Amino acid sequence: MASLWFDLRDMKFQLFEVFKIKDTILGKGRYVDFDVDTCNMALDQAAKFAEQEIAPTYPDEVHRKPVEATYKDGNVTTPEAYKRLWKLYCEAGYVAMADQPEVGGQGFPAMVAASCGCMMLSCNPAFMMYPGVTHGAARLMENYFQHPLRDIVLQKMYSGEWAGTMCLTEPGAGTDVGALKTTAKKNPDGSYSIVGTKSFISGGDQDLSPNIIHPVLARIEGDPKGTRGISIFMVPKIRFNEKGELGESNDVFCSGIESKMGIHGSATCTLNFGDNGKCIGWLMGEQGQGMPIMFNMMNEERQAVGMIGAALATSSYLHALDYCKQRIQGCDVIAMAMKIEDAPAIAIINHPDIRRMLLKMKSISEGIRALCMLCYFCMDNVFSAMYSIAMDPNANKEELEKQKEYWEGMIEILTPIVKSYATDMGMMACDLAVQSYGGYGYCREYPVEQMMRDQKINAIYEGTNGIQALDLLGRKLGLKKGAYFINLLNYTAEAINEADTIDSLKGEAAIVKAALTACGLTAKDFSKMIGTTPYVPLIGACDYLNCLGDAIVGWLHLRIAIEATKKFVDPSTGEQEKAFYRGKIEGAKFFINRITGLVPAKTDNLKKDEQSAMNIPLESFASE
Ligand SMILES: Cc1cc2nc3c(=O)[nH]c(=O)nc-3n(C[C@H](O)[C@H](O)[C@H](O)COP(=O)(O)OP(=O)(O)OC[C@H]3O[C@@H](n4cnc5c(N)ncnc54)[C@H](O)[C@@H]3O)c2cc1C
């Protein structure tokens, strides 16, 4: 039976047929040792692991008892099932699936590892927070922790023996990280004494691993205010020696965890560093470089958060689809119109409004996953170029450097869109899933209400979606005088031109082209408005990001439809496969016509000189 959590066939379709990784990624550069069979095997194994081991741990309530991380006397206890799961996950090598063998990784392409991760995220995003943040922290250590303890830290973290976190947020420093108060004072031996409180730290304490490595943002005494004066430190929960043997506590105390709307199994901790003056850390990278260094981890996490958005959209959709096929309610609309007496009651999937919701969920979840995959595709191209520059003496280094910059530029533009659009639209899919269940969707008996609660956080952490939109408009679109954005727009031309030669997709090609053009022109208009009516683009930033998402995902659906159409008309395609490809084509048509098609009107609307959100006096928001 097909999974209710993820669609393995669709994962493979996107990898091998849409992004064509056999020709574009595998068998060369860094991925010279990988072929389609190796990737298929990894995907099949990950699907089995996700379905059999992770999915059963999903419900955050069993027999009306909560399944959640709990706190007592400075210690966090994770749900019982997580301990075994963590062990299995780490033993299977999933923490470092896409990392180089030199650090204990399996070296898989990022796209393949992300597809495996996506299936697991669909099955329990709260559990997946622990290995997810651990991996991001390990990468940060690999790139920026230059210290004799580095090797042991990498070995312990990439194997999952020790876990990791990211410590930016403080009670008075959320979005405004520069307002942080945590301090670092240099000791005679070169280490730093760390004092401060970090809040909302995912996995800040847990009982899955004997040690936790915290990358902590702090200000070295005397350094300037704001983000310029921030440095980053490696701060362990328990001190250790070069052999990895654990010693005394490092004075990191968990003073509580949050009681949250969702992801109940993930402990969101308040951490006190140095309450007793005995917390030490080691500088990572250069003094004052804390923010640029932490951004490396944040960007990785932002892409992962987009993927959680897509993963929960998929599991909500598949559960809703199953329910709508079974729930009998009402009779056929034509029979009703014709007042046919005794018309049989039918499954709700036959009602046009339910069809609308299901196809919208399907096209959103597959579209935003394609968007996330596009970003990982860019990463694999960057990794391969870097590998060839370093390892291939005959390589044309100048050309490879250009390619690397091209793909890095794409990632710059795509990151805020992946983080924000995939999570906003993912939320929409979860909302539609609850709606399609009717009253039962609102009840704990069915998992879609939990999925909707679990989904909400993705729009908030790793920089809220509002901040992503400001980053896109205020910084990313203008990078290299707009060249990166123009590269992205130009990159879409090939698929649009190809679709234009396929009769059944001509109309969709024109819609996607018009939407992308509207987004390009609006970006130009907005940049002019910043000098004249700045509030107009600032009020419109989130909506603009979503328009650009609608346009890019429309283009990705066009690519999906092109490949699906070729296979659909191929006489050698079997009936079951035909049904699969037909689903891709209808999903693409729905998304492009009903969502992407609205973009030009929406962007026109955004450019109106309409500033009521700023004109309204504070005292007029509500009666005093
Ligand atoms: C479950 C959970 C897990 C988390 N995990 C971690 C973690 O592991 N590590 C970590 O360091 N942090 C973590 N966080 C913190 C998270 O990243 C912050 O909550 C988030 O960055 C927002 O900060 P804030 O909550 O202080 O909101 P605020 O900064 O107070 O923002 C409130 C609202 O104002 C808006 N806003 C603020 N400033 C501006 C501005 N300049 N322009 C426009 N709008 C603005 C925001 O977009 C938001 O809508 C986690 C949070 C939660 C809830």
Image (cartoon, grey):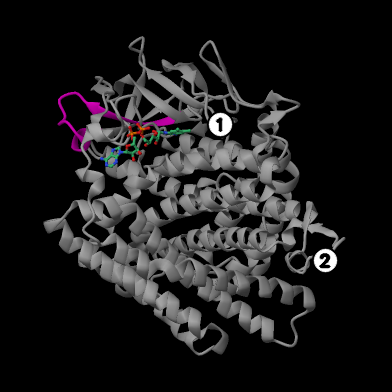
Q: Quadrant of ligand 1?
A: top left
Report the mark closest to the observer, 1 or 2: 2
- Which label is found at residue 512? none
Residue in the foreground of this view, choosing between 490 and 581: 581
Q: Is residue 272 left or right of residue 35?
A: left
Pick the front one: 526 or 28: 526
Q: Which residue is mark 1?
A: 266
Using residue 174 as the reference point, say whether residue 42 is left or right of it: right
Residues under labels 1 and 2: Cα distance?
A: 53 Å
Give the magenta part as a residue range: 213-230
Q: Residue 340 got which mark?
A: 2
Among the two numbered marks 1 and 2 on one chain, the one whose residue lies closer to the N terminus: 1
Using the rendered image of the protein, determine whether residue 194 is visible from the camera's viewpoint.
Answer: yes
Determine if the magenta segment contains residue 218: yes
Name which quarter of the figure residue 536 lies in. Answer: bottom left
> Residue 148 colored magenta?
no
